[in-house]
Image (tube, grey):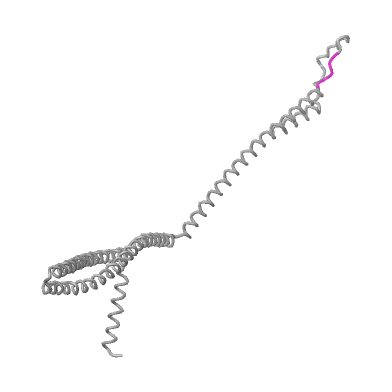
């Protein structure tokens, strides 16, 4: 392979790559439809020109037919008048118009065929343009959807999902810790209330027991029908401390310690 061939291929490859990168699908679709519409305009102009030529040929053919009929009548009239030479001239003129009419008829048939073909092509092109417009809108919608999906995918891939999820996990852990603290505080508050009520209940039992002991320690009541005891002499020795009083003092000290 020669050097110039390699250079040509490299240049062609680079140009093709640039063209592919520069092609915008939406713009290319619009351009394609625009070119088809331009072709449609040209085809319509061509059909119009062909139909105009057909009309001219048809008029010329009809004129030739009229001339043929006219010179046929002239020849008949000349024969009726006995002028055979004039009749011959009329027939010569008829022959000329007949030849012209034959040529015009061939051209007219050809033009009719061309007009019918152009009309069919025109209808087909109009149908293709309508189909192309519909397909263009569909493709544009797909392009828009694809771009949106690509953009969304880029946003999703660009997001730091792991850090976001770890942040949620940390916040959830903090909420759990806060809830545990609130529950513990409630339990401690309830425990304090129970302790206070338990102390009140235990204190009430001790008071009841103390009252019962006091009732037991009181001396029996003196009967009303008995006489009074003689007064003691002033020289009587002081009464010693009873063991009950000692026990009572001990109980009071224990209650104070509680």
Q: Is residue 68 magenta?
A: no
The image shows residue 126 at horizontal and vertical percentages of 32, 63
The image shows residue 4 at horizontal and vertical percentages of 26, 87
- Which residue is located at x 11 percent, y 74 percent? 85
Which is more toward the observer, 152 or 22?
22
Q: Is residue 220 magenta?
A: yes
Left of 86 or right of it: where is 255?
A: right
Q: Magenta part of the protein: which range? A: 218-222
Quadrant containing the N terminus is bottom left
- Which residue is located at x 28 percent, y 76 percent? 15
Which is more toward the observer, 71 or 16?
71
Work out which residue is located at the far bottom of the displayed protein and give it: 1
Which is more toward the observer, 125 or 107?
107
The image shows residue 53 at horizontal and vertical percentages of 20, 67
Quadrant containing the C terminus is top right
- Which residue is located at x 38 percent, y 60 percent? 138
- Which residue is located at x 82 percent, y 16 percent? 235
Left of 32 or right of it: where is 81?
A: left
Up-down relation of residue 184 to residue 124 (above or below): above
Magenta part mainly helix, strand or loop?
loop
Residue 127 lies in quadrant: bottom left
């Amino acid at each position: 392979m020669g050097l110039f061939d390699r250079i040509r291929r490299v240049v062609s490859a680079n140009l093709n790559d640039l063209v592919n990168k520069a092609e915008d699908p939406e713009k290319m679709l619009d351009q394609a439809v625009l070119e088809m519409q331009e072709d449609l305009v040209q085809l319509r102009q061509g059909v119009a020109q062909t139909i105009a030529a057909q009309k001219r040929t048809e008029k010329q053919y009809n004129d030739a037919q009229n001339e043929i009929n006219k010179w046929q009548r002239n020849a008949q009239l000349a024969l009726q008048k006995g002028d055979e030479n004039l009749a011959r001239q009329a027939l010569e003129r008829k022959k000329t118009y007949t030849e012209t009419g034959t040529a015009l008829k061939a051209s007219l048939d050809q033009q009719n065929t061309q007009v019918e073909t152009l009309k069919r092509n025109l209808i087909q092109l109009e149908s293709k343009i309508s189909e192309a417009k519909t397909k263009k809108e569909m493709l544009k919608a797909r392009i828009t959807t694809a771009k949106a999906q690509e953009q969304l995918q880029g946003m999703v891939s660009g997001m730091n999902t792991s850090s976001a999820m770890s942040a949620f996990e940390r916040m959830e852990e903090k909420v759990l810790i806060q809830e545990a603290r609130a529950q513990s505080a409630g339990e401690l508050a309830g425990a304090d209330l129970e302790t206070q009520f338990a102390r009140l209940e235990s204190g009430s039992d001790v008071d009841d027991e103390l009252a019962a002991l006091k009732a037991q320690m009181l001396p029996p009541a003196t009967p009303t029908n008995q006489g009074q005891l003689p007064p003691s002499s002033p020289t009587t020795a002081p009464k010693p401390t009873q063991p009950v009083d000692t026990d009572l003092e001990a109980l009071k000290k224990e209650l104070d310690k509680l």
